[in-house]
Image (spheres, rainbow, N blue to C red):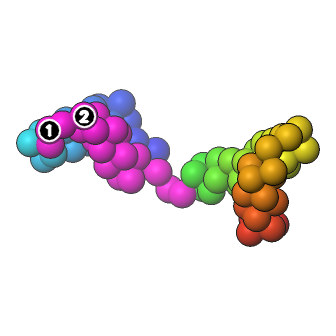
Amino acid sequence: MLTQTQKQQIAQDIVKQYAIIEGAYAETMLQGIAHFYADSGVETDAHAALDATLHTQVIAELAAITTDVEAAAVYAAELEAIQ
């Protein structure tokens, strides 16, 4: 486990290395880079599984309540693809 000092040093190093990034997505990119360096993958995998389950539930609920024929076809195709 990293100490607070080590975490701060890593964060400073990442920001220093990627400080030249500019634009609307600069902050998001820096967060992604920090996440890449800090994440073992276990937590991300857990979130991904939960996200997939939630996504399937939302699409199924939207398919059940829509009155738009085209939207219903899109939801049905997406449900078929993810199940």
Q: What is the span of residues highlighted in magenta in the rendered image?
A: 21-41
- Residue 61 seen anywhere in this rendered image of the structure: no
Residue 15 on the magenta segment: no
Question: Which residue is farthest right?
Answer: 64
Q: Quadrant of residue 54?
A: top right
Q: Position of residue 28 (x, y in %)?
A: 34, 38
Q: Is residue 26 left or right of residue 70?
A: left
Q: Main secondary structure of the magenta part?
A: helix
- Work out whether residue 46 or residue 72 is closer to the camera in this orientation and state it: 72
| Tag 2 and tag 1, C-beta contact below 8 Å | no
State which quarter of the image contains the C terminus: bottom right
Q: Where does label 1 land, which residue?
A: 22
| 21 over 76 or under it: above or below | above
| 53 over 26 or under it: above or below | below
**Residue that appears at 40% across and 42% down:** 2
Q: Amino acid at mark 2?
A: Ala
Q: Is residue 40 left or right of residue 34?
A: right
**Residue that appears at 64% across and 53% down:** 48
Q: Amino acid at mark 1?
A: Glu
Q: Residues within 10 Å of mark 2 (few under 14, many from 20)?
A: few
Q: Residues within 10 Å of mark 1 (few under 14, many from 20)?
A: few
Question: Which residue is farthest front?
Answer: 69
- Work out whether residue 51 or residue 67 is closer to the camera in this orientation and state it: 67
Q: Where does label 2 land, which residue?
A: 24
